[in-house]
Image: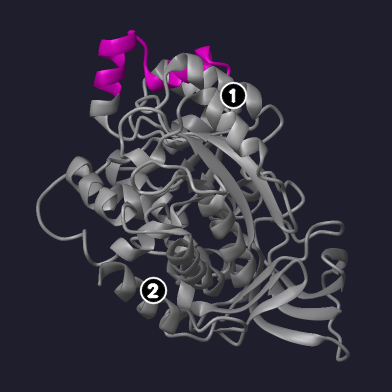
Amino acid sequence: MKLSCELAWLGGEAAERDVLLEISGDQLVAVTPGAPTDDAYRLSGLTLPGLANAHSHAFQRALRGRTHAGEGSFWTWREQMYELATTLDPDSCFALSRAAFGEMALAGITCVGEFHYLHHAPDGTPYDDPNAMGRAVLAAARAAGLRCTLLDACYLHGGIERFRDRDAAAWAERVDMLAERGPARVGAAIHSVRAVDPDAARVVAEWAAGKPLHAHVSEQPKENEDTLARHGRTPTALLADAGALGANFTAIHATHLTEEDVALLGGSTVCLCPTTERDLADGIGAMRRLVDAGASLSLGSDSHALIDLFEEARAVELDERLASGERGRHDSAALLRAASADGHASLGWPDAGRIEPGGRADLVTVSLESVRLAGTAPENALDSVVFAATATDVRHVLVDGNEVVVDGTHRGIDAVSALDETVRKVWA
C-alpha cells in the first residue's frame, strides 16, 4: 500500500510536505518526504502517528453527563462510579467497552491502555472463567479495531466486592491465565497504595518484570495524608520501596508530589489525564518538574469526561500556564510525542507512535479544513492541530495497516448508535 500525505509529522519541530508512505502488512517500510506522486492514495491534511490512550476505564464512559454538575468531590464522584460498576456483567461490559473504544478510534486513538478492575460478579464471586470481564474488554477492543494493553489491576482493600481478589497471590494466579492474543498485551496495575498494601505491591511488581506496570499515584491530598499516617511514607516512596518504579512503570495523575517524589519518578513515565483531573477537582500536576527530572509524559482520557487526546495534550500546557503564570512549558512536538510514541511505549508497544521505517502502520489524518483549522499554513500546522484541533477533525485512521476510520466514519461500528443503546441500557 502506498499513501501520499499532504503533510506528515515525522517527529521534528514541524510537519514535512508531500510524504510518501509505503506499507507492507502492519509495518511502514519506507517514508519519503518531498515525494509527490500520482500513484498513491492522497491523505489531505496533517498525518500523525497513531495516538495512544494510556489510561482508560472504558465502563466509566456511561457516567458522562451524569456526574459532572453540582457540588461534591472526587470522593462523592467515586460513590456514583461504584453504583455504575455494580450493574455490569461480561456482556454489558463488552457492549459498553466496544462503543467507548469505537469513539476512541474516531478520535484518532489506535491503542488503549485499559486499567481494569471489574474482575468478579457484583457480590465478589468469581465467574466460571475468572477473567471473563477482562476477556470481554479485550474482545471489545478487537471489535473496535484497536490494539489494547489490558492493565489488570490488583485491588485488595476498600472499593466494592467485585474489584477485589483474595490476596496478591490469587491475583497473580488469575492473571497468569490471561494469554496475550492477537493485537493485545497483558500488563499489571497496582490500583493504588490505598487498595494494595506494600507487601502485595511487591508481589505485583515482581510479576510485572519486563511488562507494563501502572498505578494511581497521589491523585488526591487525602490519599497522601492517609498513607503518611499509616506508613510514614508518601505513595511514591512506598511504591519505590516495593520495587515498582523504573522504566516499565507509569504513575497515573501524580498530582500532589513532594520534591523527593519527583526525583523518584525521574526514570518512569507519568500519565496525565487533564480532562478527568479538572472534572474531579484533583488539581494541576507539575509535569515540567517531572520532565526536568527525567520522567516521560503520556496521556489518558481516564473517566472519559471527554475522549479527545488533542484536548488532553494542550491541557497539559495550558493548565500549567494557569498554575505557574508562565507560557511555553511544553512545546507542540513534546505534547504530540506524549500522545503517540511515549504513550505507546508505556503500554508495551515501543515500535508504535512514530512514522518511520520499521514502525507500526498506525496513522491518523487530521483535516485542516474545519472552521477551527481553516487558514493553517504548513509551517504552523503542528501548533494549529495541537492547540486548536478536536477529535471531530480526524478523518482517517489506520491501525496496523488496516483502515478503521475512513472519511470520519468508523468502518465497523456505528459508534453513536452503539453508545446511545449501551448507555441507556446500563441506566435503565
Q: Mark 2, residues whose alpha carbon is within 10 Å: few (<14), some, or many (≥20)?
A: many
The spot of residue 299 in percent (x, y) is: 50, 50
| Residue 78 in the figure: left or right of residue 183 | left
Residue 287 included in the magenta stretch of the image: no
The dot on residue 205 is: 1
Mark 1 falls on what kind of element?
helix
Q: Residue at x 52, y 86 (%)?
A: 369
Residue 232 included in the magenta stretch of the image: yes
The spot of residue 249 in percent (x, y) is: 58, 31
Dot in front, 2 or 1: 2
The dot on residue 426 is: none
The spot of residue 365 in percent (x, y) is: 63, 75
Magenta highlight range: 224-244
Q: Residue at x 75, y 86 (%)?
A: 42
Marks 2 & 1, CB-CB < 8 Å contact: no
Magenta segment's dominant SS is helix
- The disc labelled 1 sits on which kind of residue? Ala
Q: Mark 1, residues whose alpha carbon is within 10 Å: few (<14), some, or many (≥20)?
A: many
Q: Residue tagged by mark 2?
A: 422
